[in-house]
Amino acid sequence: MTKENIKEIGKRIKEIRAVLRIKQKDLAEALDIAGCYLSELESGKGNPCHAFFYKLSTRFGVSLDYLFHGEGEMFLKSKSLKEMEKTLGKDTVMTVENLSRLIELSPMFKYQVLGFAAKFNLDNAHIIKQDIENYFAKLSEDK
Protein backbone atom coordinates (compact mmCIF):
# COMPACT_ATOMS: atom_id res chain seq x y z
CA MET A 1 0.00 0.00 0.00
CA THR A 2 1.16 3.49 -0.74
CA LYS A 3 1.27 6.24 1.88
CA GLU A 4 -1.64 7.93 0.12
CA ASN A 5 -3.73 4.73 0.30
CA ILE A 6 -2.94 4.35 3.98
CA LYS A 7 -4.04 7.94 4.65
CA GLU A 8 -7.32 7.40 2.77
CA ILE A 9 -7.99 4.17 4.65
CA GLY A 10 -7.28 6.01 7.91
CA LYS A 11 -9.84 8.68 7.00
CA ARG A 12 -12.42 5.99 6.24
CA ILE A 13 -11.73 4.20 9.53
CA LYS A 14 -12.39 7.49 11.33
CA GLU A 15 -15.61 7.99 9.30
CA ILE A 16 -16.78 4.49 10.19
CA ARG A 17 -16.14 5.15 13.86
CA ALA A 18 -18.07 8.44 13.62
CA VAL A 19 -21.05 6.71 12.00
CA LEU A 20 -20.96 4.03 14.70
CA ARG A 21 -20.76 6.81 17.32
CA ILE A 22 -18.05 4.95 19.16
CA LYS A 23 -14.98 6.35 20.87
CA GLN A 24 -11.55 5.44 19.58
CA LYS A 25 -10.73 3.65 22.84
CA ASP A 26 -13.94 1.58 22.64
CA LEU A 27 -13.34 0.57 19.03
CA ALA A 28 -9.76 -0.41 19.85
CA GLU A 29 -11.03 -2.51 22.74
CA ALA A 30 -13.68 -4.18 20.57
CA LEU A 31 -11.03 -5.06 17.98
CA ASP A 32 -8.50 -6.21 20.59
CA ILE A 33 -5.90 -3.69 19.48
CA ALA A 34 -4.01 -0.92 21.27
CA GLY A 35 -5.60 2.51 21.24
CA CYS A 36 -2.36 4.09 20.05
CA TYR A 37 -2.32 1.66 17.08
CA LEU A 38 -5.86 2.72 16.10
CA SER A 39 -4.87 6.35 16.47
CA GLU A 40 -1.90 5.78 14.13
CA LEU A 41 -4.17 4.05 11.61
CA GLU A 42 -6.73 6.87 11.65
CA SER A 43 -4.03 9.50 11.18
CA GLY A 44 -2.51 7.56 8.27
CA LYS A 45 0.75 6.95 10.10
CA GLY A 46 0.28 3.25 10.84
CA ASN A 47 0.22 0.38 8.41
CA PRO A 48 -2.89 -1.78 9.02
CA CYS A 49 -2.44 -5.53 9.09
CA HIS A 50 -4.78 -8.14 7.60
CA ALA A 51 -6.05 -9.13 11.06
CA PHE A 52 -7.25 -5.56 11.64
CA PHE A 53 -9.26 -5.55 8.40
CA TYR A 54 -10.72 -8.96 9.19
CA LYS A 55 -11.82 -7.93 12.69
CA LEU A 56 -13.30 -4.62 11.53
CA SER A 57 -15.22 -6.36 8.77
CA THR A 58 -16.52 -9.31 10.79
CA ARG A 59 -17.26 -7.57 14.09
CA PHE A 60 -18.81 -4.40 12.66
CA GLY A 61 -19.95 -5.49 9.20
CA VAL A 62 -17.68 -3.01 7.42
CA SER A 63 -17.40 -3.43 3.66
CA LEU A 64 -13.79 -3.95 2.60
CA ASP A 65 -14.58 -2.38 -0.79
CA TYR A 66 -15.55 0.77 1.04
CA LEU A 67 -12.60 0.59 3.41
CA PHE A 68 -9.96 0.01 0.72
CA HIS A 69 -11.41 1.99 -2.18
CA GLY A 70 -14.17 4.23 -0.77
CA GLU A 71 -16.67 2.47 -3.05
CA GLY A 72 -20.09 1.04 -2.31
CA GLU A 73 -21.90 0.88 1.01
CA MET A 74 -19.95 1.44 4.20
CA PHE A 75 -21.54 -1.57 5.90
CA LEU A 76 -22.44 -5.04 4.69
CA LYS A 77 -25.89 -6.39 5.28
CA SER A 78 -26.16 -9.87 6.71
CA LYS A 79 -28.59 -12.30 5.12
CA SER A 80 -30.72 -12.30 8.24
CA LEU A 81 -30.93 -8.51 8.22
CA LYS A 82 -31.94 -8.54 4.54
CA GLU A 83 -34.64 -11.09 5.30
CA MET A 84 -35.85 -9.00 8.21
CA GLU A 85 -36.04 -5.88 6.01
CA LYS A 86 -38.27 -7.80 3.59
CA THR A 87 -40.55 -8.86 6.44
CA LEU A 88 -40.66 -5.54 8.28
CA GLY A 89 -39.88 -2.97 5.64
CA LYS A 90 -36.72 -0.91 5.93
CA ASP A 91 -38.08 1.77 8.25
CA THR A 92 -40.56 -0.20 10.34
CA VAL A 93 -40.01 -1.69 13.76
CA MET A 94 -43.29 -3.07 15.03
CA THR A 95 -42.33 -4.79 18.29
CA VAL A 96 -39.63 -4.71 20.92
CA GLU A 97 -38.60 -8.17 19.74
CA ASN A 98 -38.07 -6.85 16.18
CA LEU A 99 -36.05 -3.92 17.51
CA SER A 100 -33.92 -6.28 19.62
CA ARG A 101 -33.34 -8.51 16.60
CA LEU A 102 -32.29 -5.53 14.44
CA ILE A 103 -29.86 -4.40 17.14
CA GLU A 104 -28.45 -7.92 17.32
CA LEU A 105 -28.04 -8.25 13.54
CA SER A 106 -26.63 -4.83 12.73
CA PRO A 107 -23.69 -3.40 14.68
CA MET A 108 -24.21 -0.06 12.94
CA PHE A 109 -27.86 0.06 14.04
CA LYS A 110 -26.87 -0.95 17.58
CA TYR A 111 -24.34 1.84 17.91
CA GLN A 112 -26.73 4.36 16.37
CA VAL A 113 -29.41 3.42 18.91
CA LEU A 114 -26.89 3.66 21.74
CA GLY A 115 -25.66 7.01 20.41
CA PHE A 116 -29.18 8.42 20.20
CA ALA A 117 -29.97 7.12 23.70
CA ALA A 118 -26.83 8.71 25.13
CA LYS A 119 -27.61 12.03 23.43
CA PHE A 120 -31.21 11.91 24.62
CA ASN A 121 -30.03 11.20 28.16
CA LEU A 122 -27.53 14.07 28.01
CA ASP A 123 -30.03 16.53 26.53
CA ASN A 124 -32.81 15.58 28.95
CA ALA A 125 -30.91 14.70 32.15
CA HIS A 126 -32.82 17.23 34.25
CA ILE A 127 -36.21 15.92 33.06
CA ILE A 128 -35.22 12.28 33.62
CA LYS A 129 -33.93 13.11 37.10
CA GLN A 130 -37.20 14.87 37.93
CA ASP A 131 -39.25 11.91 36.65
CA ILE A 132 -37.25 9.51 38.82
CA GLU A 133 -37.69 11.75 41.88
CA ASN A 134 -41.44 11.98 41.20
CA TYR A 135 -41.67 8.20 40.86
CA PHE A 136 -39.98 7.57 44.20
CA ALA A 137 -42.01 10.32 45.87
CA LYS A 138 -45.21 8.63 44.65
CA LEU A 139 -43.98 5.27 45.96
CA SER A 140 -43.40 6.85 49.38
CA GLU A 141 -46.90 8.37 49.37
CA ASP A 142 -48.51 5.03 48.47
CA LYS A 143 -46.99 3.29 51.50
Image: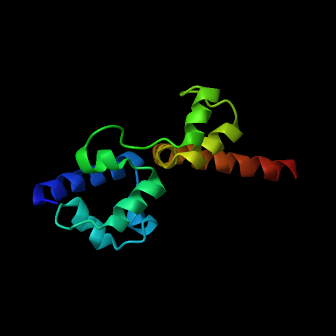
Q: How is the image coloured?
A: rainbow
From the viewer's perspective, is residue 45 above or below residue 79? below
Q: Nearer the viewer, residue 118 or 9?
A: 9
Quadrant of the rendered image containing residue 95 = top right
Q: Nearer the viewer, residue 71 or 135?
A: 71
Quadrant of the rendered image containing residue 56 = bottom left
Q: Is residue 104 left or right of residue 21?
A: right
From the viewer's perspective, is residue 52 above or below residue 17? below
Q: Position of residue 113 (x, y in %)?
A: 52, 44
Q: Is residue 35 left or right of residue 131?
A: left
Q: Is residue 115 left or right of residue 42?
A: right
Q: Nearer the viewer, residue 18 or 107?
A: 107
Q: Position of residue 88 (x, y in %)?
A: 63, 28
Q: Kindly give the residue lying farthest to the right in the view shown.
A: 143
Number of numbered discs overlaid on the protein picture: 0
Which residue is pictured at 66% across the width and 49% down the height? 132
From the viewer's perspective, is residue 83 above or below residue 139? above
Quadrant of the rendered image containing residue 50 = bottom left
Q: Position of residue 115 (x, y in %)?
A: 46, 47
Which residue is pictured at 86% across the width and 48% down the height? 142
Which image quadrant: the N terminus? bottom left
Q: Is residue 3 left or right of residue 57?
A: left
Q: Position of residue 2 (x, y in %)?
A: 12, 59
Q: Nearer the viewer, residue 35 or 5?
A: 5
Which residue is pictured at 60% across the width and 49% down the height? 104
